[in-house]
C-alpha cells in the first residue's frame, strides 16, 4: 500500500514594522499560522496588539522587551502605540496544507 500526501509544506517568515498612533497590519502574517509578536527592548512606549480595530485602550499591551505567542490564528494581527517611532517584530510558522 502506498500513501501519497499532496499540499504545501509549512514555512517560517519573520518581519518588523514601525508602529505609530494608527493601527498597522503586520504585513506577512497569515490567517492559519502561529506567530510570536515582540516589542523590541529599544521601544520607549508600550505597543498594543489585536485585530483591525485595535486601540491603546482595547489592545493587548506589550511593554518594551515583551512578547506574546498567538497559536493558530484566524485573523490578521495589527499593532498600535500611543506614540510614533515604536517597533514590532514577529516570527510565524504557516501550517502546511494538504
Image (cartoon, grey):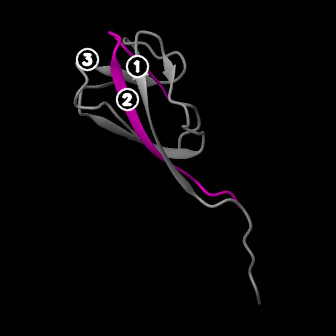
Picture quarter containing residue 70?
Answer: top left
Q: Mark 2 points at which residue?
A: 88
In reply to whether residue 66 is colored magenta, the answer given is no
Which residue is depicted at the point 62% across and 58% down? Answer: 96
In this figure, what is the number of numbered marks? Answer: 3
Q: Mark 3 points at which residue?
A: 45
Can residue 60 be seen in the rendering of this structure?
no
Q: Nearer the viewer, residue 11 or 85?
A: 85
Q: Is residue 95 left or right of residue 58?
A: right
Q: Do the residues labelled 2 and 1 touch (CB within 8 Å)?
A: yes
- Mark found first going from the N terminus, 2 or 1: 1
- Mark found first going from the N terminus, 1 or 3: 1
Query: Which portion, as a residue range, is magenta?
Result: 77-98
Relative to 1, does residue 14 appear above or below in the rendering? above
Q: How crowded is mark 2: few (under 14 residues within 10 Å), some or many (20 or more)?
A: many
Q: Residues within 10 Å of mark 1 (few under 14, many from 20)?
A: many
Q: Nearer the viewer, residue 84 or 32?
A: 84
Q: Is residue 45 left or right of residue 71?
A: left
The CA distance from mark 2 to mark 1 is 7 Å
In reply to whether residue 89 is colored magenta, the answer given is yes
The CA distance from mark 3 to mark 2 is 11 Å
- Mark found first going from the N terminus, 3 or 2: 3
Determine whether the residue tagged by mark 3 lies in a helix, strand or loop: loop
Which residue is depicted at the point 37% across and 11% down? Answer: 57
Q: Mark 1 points at which residue?
A: 19
The CA distance from mark 1 to mark 3 is 10 Å
Which residue is depicted at the point 47% across and 11% down? Answer: 22
Determine whether the residue tagged by mark 2 lies in a helix, strand or loop: strand
Query: Looking at the picture, how far across and down is residue 30, in whole percent?
Result: 58, 39
Query: Looking at the picture, how far across and down is residue 7, in whole percent?
Result: 72, 62
Work out which quarter of the rendered image holds the C terminus and state it: bottom right
Q: Do the residues labelled 3 and 2 touch (CB within 8 Å)?
A: no
Amino acid at each position: 500500500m502506498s500513501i501519497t500526501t499532496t499540499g504545501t509544506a509549512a514555512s517560517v517568515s519573520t518581519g518588523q514594522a514601525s508602529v505609530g498612533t494608527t493601527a498597522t497590519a503586520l504585513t506577512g502574517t497569515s490567517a492559519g499560522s502561529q506567530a510570536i509578536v515582540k516589542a523590541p527592548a529599544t521601544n520607549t512606549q508600550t505597543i498594543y496588539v489585536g485585530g483591525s480595530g485595535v486601540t491603546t485602550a482595547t489592545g493587548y499591551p506589550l511593554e518594551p522587551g515583551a512578547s506574546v505567542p498567538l497559536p493558530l490564528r484566524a485573523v490578521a494581527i495589527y499593532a498600535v502605540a500611543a506614540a510614533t517611532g515604536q517597533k514590532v517584530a514577529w516570527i510565524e510558522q504557516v501550517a502546511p496544507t494538504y
